[in-house]
């Protein structure tokens, strides 16, 4: 309890940084993943091959290597990012490879007859996407999307390598100063468990809300 009282504000800052990295990284990954999914379903072969190469590259390499390349290799090509920006970009790139495959499978499973019927009724492409494609897409893929967001959350611990002051970095700093490694690790485990539960419950609520489109 003395450690919690002493390092409570530091924990709170690290926790807030972790939440920001997870939210922004997942949001950017979702948007980029949707674009890559449409590229993989495109009738143009070069777009399909580019999307397949992207997914192959980011799913096949460890997140730590991707992070170090973005952060340390960027200046060699004229791209200079601070630790926070480099961390967010890498989280987005890493997550988008998984989100794209989820979206690709979800879009491919949608009944083409519904899309054709909406087109015959004169609905615009935007309306078809928002009202015909999105509801069943997110309903069927919600559990997988939630799992991927949780994976992004857990990968934020690696950001401490480039000195992003997230939860893992703050916990390590406290442990180094007090030598209380066991309480520090237990505190981190509990906090991450709480975050995972919040994401899981939010996913269940979203799935329940989208369930009205099932019929």
Image: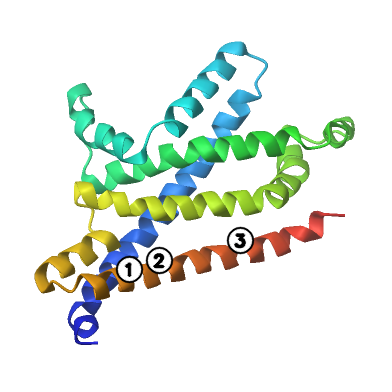
Secondary element at tag 3: helix
Q: Is residue 209 left or right of residue 21?
A: right
Secondary element at tag 2: helix
Q: Residue at x 21, y 85 (%)?
A: 5
Viewer-nearest of discs 1 and 3: 1
Q: Residue at x 59, y 68 (%)?
A: 201
Instruction: Please state the total of marks drawn on the protein image.
Output: 3
Image quadrant in which you'd find residue 115: top right
Q: Callout 2: 10 Å neighbours few (<14), some, many (20+)?
A: some
Viewer-nearest of discs 3 and 2: 2
Secondary element at tag 1: helix
Residue 57: x percent and y percent? 43, 26
Residue 172: x percent and y percent? 20, 63
Along the line of sight, which residue is nearer the eye, 161 or 24?
161
Q: Residue at x 88, y 33 (%)?
A: 113
Q: CA distance from mark 3 to mark 2?
A: 17 Å
Disc 3 to disc 2: CB gap under 8 Å: no
Circle 3 residue: 203
Along the line of sight, which residue is nearer the eye, 186 or 196?
186
Q: Residue at x 13, y 71 (%)?
A: 179
Q: CA distance from mark 1 to mark 3?
A: 23 Å
Instruction: For residue 8, say whether it is visible.
Output: yes
First along the sequence among labels 3 and 2: 2
Disc 2 to disc 1: CB gap under 8 Å: yes
User: Which disc number belongs to residue 188?
Assistant: 1
Q: Which residue is most to the bottom?
A: 1
Circle 2 residue: 192
Along the line of sight, which residue is nearer the eye, 118 or 57?
57
Figure colour scheme: rainbow
Residue 133: x percent and y percent? 74, 41
């Amino acid at each position: 309890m003395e450690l919690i009282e002493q390092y409570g504000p530091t924990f709170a800052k690290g926790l807030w940084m972790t939440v920001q990295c997870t939210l922004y990284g997942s949001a950017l990954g979702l948007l980029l993943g949707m674009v890559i999914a449409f590229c993989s379903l495109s009738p143009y072969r070069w777009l399909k091959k580019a999307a397949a190469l992207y997914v192959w590259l980011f799913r096949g390499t460890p997140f730590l290597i991707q992070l170090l390349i973005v952060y340390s290799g960027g200046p060699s090509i004229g791209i200079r990012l601070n630790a926070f920006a480099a961390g967010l970009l890498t989280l987005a790139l890493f997550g988008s490879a998984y989100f794209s495959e989820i979206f690709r499978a979800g879009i491919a499973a949608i009944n083409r007859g519904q899309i054709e019927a909406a087109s015959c009724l004169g609905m615009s492409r935007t309306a078809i996407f928002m009202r015909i494609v999105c509801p069943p897409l997110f309903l069927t893929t919600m559990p997988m999307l939630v799992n991927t967001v949780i994976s992004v959350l857990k990968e934020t611990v690696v950001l401490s390598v480039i000195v992003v002051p997230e939860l893992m970095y703050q916990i390590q700093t406290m442990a180094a100063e007090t030598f209380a490694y066991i309480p520090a690790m237990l505190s981190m485990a509990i906090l991450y468990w709480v975050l995972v539960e919040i994401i899981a419950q939010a996913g269940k609520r979203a799935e329940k809300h989208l369930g009205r489109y099932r019929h």
